[in-house]
Image (cartoon, rainbow, N blue to C red):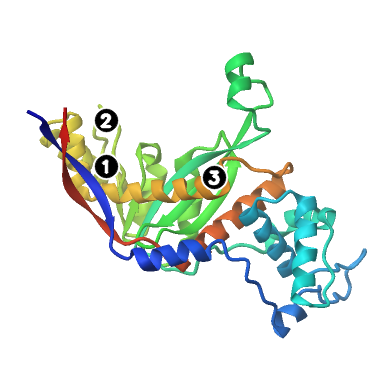
Amino acid sequence: MPKSESKQRYRITNWAEYNRSLIERGSVTIWIDDEAAKKWLAPKEKGVNGRPKTYSDDAILIALTLRVVFKLPLRALEGFLKSLITLMHVALPVPSYSQISRRAGSLGKRLKKLSRRRPTDVVFDSTGLKIYGEGEWKVRTHGVSKRRTWRKLHLAIDPSSGEILVAELTDNSKGDAQMAEGMIDKVHGNVQRVYGDGAYDSHDLRKKIAAKKAEPKIPPPRNAVPGDPIDEATRKRNEAISAIKGLGDDDDARALWKKLEGYHTRSLVETTMFRFKTIFGGNLRSRTWENQQIEAHVKCLVLNRMSKLGMPIGYWEEALEATG
């Protein structure tokens, strides 16, 4: 007799709208109105030494956005821009690939905000992005070379919308909790809950969360012991340790504590990370540190724009499947 096995399936309730948004992400319908055309060239700056800029920051940002969306090398990007301008019958000059590369690093001073949302919940997480990439076959055959390097992309995300609120790119030695301490100050709004995995269990970060009068949804490590309740941050951590011990102090107890605390909201950040790497890949094309930072930032801007086009709304349901 075949046995039945229960599995969960995700059902999307707004498939028609979400399907249209996925199609729109590949649209190359671009138009330039009079206002945008006026901002294409850089304004004249008085009292600035050196050769004046030809193109505005907006023009360079448009070029970089097209580059990350269509995964273009810099030289191909220049050709792509020229063809678009020609097809639109607009009398605008096009920056060369070398101009785009040189100007990209300076945009970091201008691009500060990724979002204007004022969330009540914030989820922190990080992921690695490869530079000087090596293929899997080469690593398996010859080992990892000294040039194999990674950057860490630290994100603060609004779980209700999937929108990236703050992004910071660092080398791979920076700790997650250390970066979150500075990033949480850049999140605007009445933050009520802050989510993070065990890597964010630091006293300094918990103090920052307590100062904002928010609840930390951060699991303490296994075998953690309560500390002297010298402040609100330590008291909250002690409460979490005691609650887990009261539930049995094992893996099942930790899983139940996470469910009771609503900790699994944090899993929504994994969806954002998956979307980021699926759309843009897991590496950075830029070579210089400044350009790598702006590349990561532009990718986050584009991902936020794609999210605004439409996101899936659905629910999990139990489904019975027959097994051998």
Which secondary structure, mark 1?
Answer: helix
Residue 249 x/y as whole percent = 16, 30
Q: Residue at x 58, y 54 (%)?
A: 299
Residue type pointed to by label 3: Leu
Q: Which residue is mark 2?
A: 224
Q: Residue at x 83, y 77 (%)?
A: 91
The residue nearer to you, when weighing 43 against 70, is 70
The residue nearer to you, when weighing 26 against 255, is 26
Q: Which residue is mark 1?
A: 237
Which secondary structure, mark 3?
Answer: strand
| Dot placed on the residue nearer the N-terminal end, 2 or 3 | 3
Residue type pointed to by label 1: Arg
Q: Residue at x 31, y 62 (%)?
A: 313
For the question of whether residue 232 can be seen, the reply is no
* Mark 1 crowd level (few <14, some 14–19, many ≥20, 10 Å Cα): many
Distance between mark 1 and mark 2 Cα atoms: 10 Å
Image position of 261 (left or right of 128) = left
Q: Which residue is mark 3?
A: 153
Quarter of the rendering occupied by the N terminus: top left
Distance between mark 2 and mark 3 Cα atoms: 28 Å
